């Protein structure tokens, strides 16, 4: 995981509509950048729906929400439509941002070891610096905790 005070790595990735996004296009805004494992899984869905429910509150704080996983553009499109997600989901099948943000790690589940994305949320300030970093977050609690953190920053 990257630490607070680190310059956030630039990325250039397609969203659920195929439009390319870069971190630098959000200069002047606070970016809530959250990494998750897979579309349409229980935890990832509860996290995304939680962010969707609080999207207006984040917007009032001049914050944009961006989710990143290694799922395809088509998968993100279906996921966003199914749950009416009002924010950007970026597709990173080559793991460029996932690795740049140091969230690709060995994971153990039921004794099986594999590589995967560790659920992590970064808050990046309007100058592109990481001002908060949380790893191994609880999916359902993460959106509210992130909003609460933004309120005190």
Image (cartoon, helix red, strand yellow):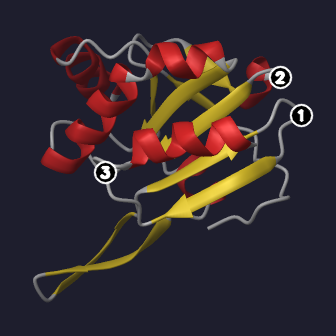
Q: Residue at x 69, y 53 (%)?
A: 132
Point out residue 147 in the picture as x, y percentages from the top left corner.
54, 36
Q: Nearer the viewer, mark 2 or mark 3?
A: 3
Numbered label attached to residue 127: 1
User: Mark 3 — residue?
Assistant: 139
Q: Residue at x 30, y 25 (%)?
A: 76
Quadrant position of the N terminus in the picture: bottom right
Q: Earlier in the sequence, mark 1 or mark 3?
A: 1
Q: Secondary structure at mark 1?
A: loop
Gap between marks 1 and 3 measured at Cα = 27 Å
Q: Is residue 9 left or right of residue 17?
A: right
Point out residue 152 in the picture as x, y percentages from the top left corner.
71, 43
Q: Residues within 10 Å of mark 2 (few under 14, many from 20)?
A: some
Kindly give the residue lying farthest to the left in the view shown. 110
Q: Earlier in the sequence, mark 2 or mark 3?
A: 2
Numbered label attached to residue 27: 2
Gap between marks 2 and 1 measured at Cα = 6 Å
The answer to whether residue 146 is visible is yes
């Amino acid at each position: 995981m990257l630490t607070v005070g680190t310059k956030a790595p630039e990325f250039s990735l397609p969203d659920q509509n195929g439009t390319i996004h870069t971190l630098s296009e959000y200069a002047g805004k606070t970016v809530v950048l959250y990494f998750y494992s897979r579309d349409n899984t229980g935890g990832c869905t509860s996290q995304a729906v939680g962010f969707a429910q609080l999207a207006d509150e984040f917007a009032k704080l001049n914050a944009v929400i961006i989710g990143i996983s290694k799922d395809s553009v088509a998968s993100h499109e279906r996921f966003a439509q199914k749950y009416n997600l009002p924010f950007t989901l970026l597709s990173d099948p080559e793991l460029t941002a996932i690795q740049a943000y140091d969230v690709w790690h060995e994971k153990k589940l039921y004794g099986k070891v594999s590589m995967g994305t560790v659920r992590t949320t970064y808050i990046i300030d309007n100058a592109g610096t990481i001002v908060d970093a949380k790893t191994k977050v609880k999916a359902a609690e993460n959106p509210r905790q992130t909003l609460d953190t933004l309120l005190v920053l």
